[in-house]
Image: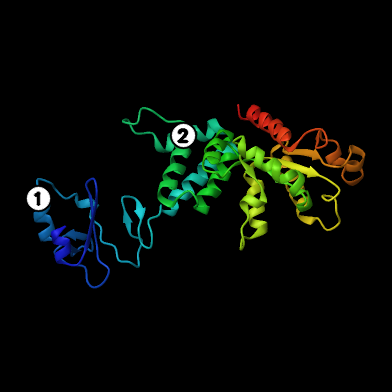
Amino acid sequence: MRLAKEHGCFYTRYADDISFSKRKGEFPAELATVGDNGKAVVGKSLRDIIEHNGFRVHPLKVHLHHNTTRQMVTGLTVNNRVNVPRAFIRNIRAMIHDWRVNGYEAAETRHHANYYSHPHRSVKPPLRKIIEGKLSFLKMISGVDDPVRQNLQRQFVNVCEEYKAVMEDEGIMHDFFICHASEDKDDLVRPLAEALRSWGVSVWYDEYMLTIGDDLREMIDAGLANSRYGIVVLSPRFFGVKKTWPKREVGALFAMEDADGKSRVLPIWHEVTQPDVAKRSPTLARILAWHSADFSPEELAAKFRDFIVTRRR
């Protein structure tokens, strides 16, 4: 550290990985230089300190990076901010793709053959745990809100439904997306959302999730993609001529059902009857629904809570 300060450098260390960096000017030859063979060589002053303390420099692990090249420290890029290499992201994406296309067992066998063939690696972890570990490492480096990581999480949960629990703990995956007309907020939707939250049920509700300046389409798409089910409040206002967003949301929920074969739409009939719904949407009329006239918002919330608890098991 004293040597680094003498030459205007920063010194960092992780275990036995030692790094020196300098913002401006030539890098001091006392720390490192480029040898006649074009490879980095530890400077005499630094080598003397290391060897005086009983250590030796590994000749294959000496690197000198200019700020115009990719700077790597302990396997991470550190040019502008600490980040994982692109190859790390591609590797996760490839494993998830292999699982989705070829099935879990084939993907796991292929991964073990490629990466766990060394004699000292006798225990081969499950592929699911490997991917989870890589996503956890990415969270530690890039943060929980990193869009690249969240995109990988959405891909992973499509092949590994158990991972939804992790996304729910991080506030990314929700139990319910509430689709409704704005006129129904006061008497039903807001009390329902508040009651669900009081039961510990994760809800995507626009008043909780949207703020001034948000991209409406982007936020709603993310909410739909990261919700298990959609509570659809069907009312005369919902079927209004100018109500485009609720209808788009229902269309997206049905598209998600078609994609994975899982039911997602959970209707509430609010001030309408089944014949009323059938006139507007025969598809929605065929789905079993609860009537808001039969239950208070709190009682409906309890029913949805019981429903999601059963599905989580």
Q: Are marks 1 and 2 in contact (CB under 8 Å)?
A: no
Q: Is residue 262 visible?
A: no
- Residue 305 visible within the image: yes
Residue 163 in picture, x, y percent from top left? 54, 36
Q: Earlier in the sequence, mark 1 or mark 2?
A: 1
Q: Which amino acid does label 1 sit on?
A: Glu
Residue drawn at 73 percent across, 47 percent down: 179
Mark 1 Cα-neighbour bin, 10 Å: few <14, some 14–19, many ≥20: few
Q: Judge the density around disc 2: few (<14), some (14-19), many (≥20) Cα neighbours within 10 Å.
A: few
x then y, percent, for residue 21:
25, 62
Gap in angstroms between the C-alphas marked 1 and 2:
41 Å
**282 relative to 201 in the view: left or right:** right
**Where residue 75 appears, x then y in whole percent?**
34, 50
Decide which of 75, 164 is in the foreground and name it. Answer: 164
Please name the colour scheme applied to the rendered image: rainbow
Q: Name the residue under label 2.
A: 129
Q: Is residue 248 above or below residue 199?
A: below
Residue, disc 1: 51
- In the rendered structure, the answer to whether residue 136 lies left or right of residue 162 reads left
Secondary structure under badge 2?
helix
Quarter holding residue 22: bottom left
Q: Nearer the viewer, residue 230 or 60?
A: 230
Q: Which residue is drawn at 83% across and 46% down?
A: 235
Image position, residue 229 (x, y; %): 69, 39
Query: Residue at the location (44% across, 47% down)?
Result: 139
Residue 253, by quadrant, is top right
Q: In this view, does 32 lie above or below 101?
A: below
Q: Left or right: where does residue 289 sit relative to residue 139? A: right
Q: Which mark is residue 165?
A: none
Dot 1 falls on a residue whose secondary structure is helix
**Residue type, label 2:** Lys
Q: Which of 178 and 207 is in front in this view?
A: 207
